[in-house]
Image (cartoon, rainbow, N blue to C red):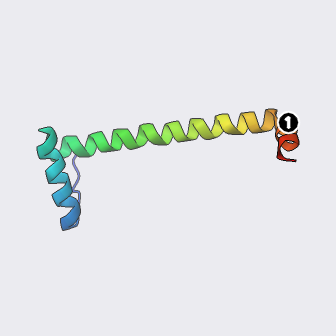
Amino acid sequence: MAMTLRLDEQHDALLEALAARFGRSKTDVVQFALDELAVRADKTERTLAAFERVRTRDRALLDRLAR
């Protein structure tokens, strides 16, 4: 699906520089950035879920350590 991406001059220059640096099109760079952001968001969600499981499971121990 095609779309128009509106960037201010600073971000357009940055996108242009990144595309040139990696020898890719601007579209490729934007798609890569979106993929990377999605992976990071997923890792963050999984990390927070794991922390919550440990916090819940070991609540008594963590309370004792806090004292």
Mark 1 is on which residue type?
A: Leu
Snapshot quadrant of residue 5: bottom left
Tell me how many marks there are.
Answer: 1
Depth order, front residue of 12/6: 12
Quarter occupied by the N terminus: top left
Q: Where is residue 25 in the image (x, y as percent from the top left)?
A: 13, 42
Q: Mark 1 points at which residue?
A: 61
Snapshot quadrant of residue 24: top left
Which residue is located at x 57 percent, y 40 percent?
Answer: 45
Which residue is located at x 20 percent, y 40 percent?
Answer: 28
Depth order, front residue of 52/27: 52
Does 21 appear above or below 10?
above
Q: Where is residue 35 in the image (x, y as percent from the top left)?
A: 35, 38
Q: Where is residue 44 in the image (x, y as percent from the top left)?
A: 54, 41
User: Is 47 on the left-hand or right-hand side of 2?
Assistant: right
Q: Element under label 1?
A: helix
Q: Where is residue 56 in the image (x, y as percent from the top left)?
A: 79, 37
User: Is 54 on the left-hand or right-hand side of 16?
Assistant: right
Q: Can residue 1 be seen in this view?
A: no
Q: Residues within 10 Å of mark 1 (few under 14, many from 20)?
A: few
Q: Can residue 51 be seen in this view?
A: yes
Does 50 appear above or below 15?
above
Which residue is located at x 14 percent, y 43 percent?
Answer: 21
Does 12 appear above or below 2?
below
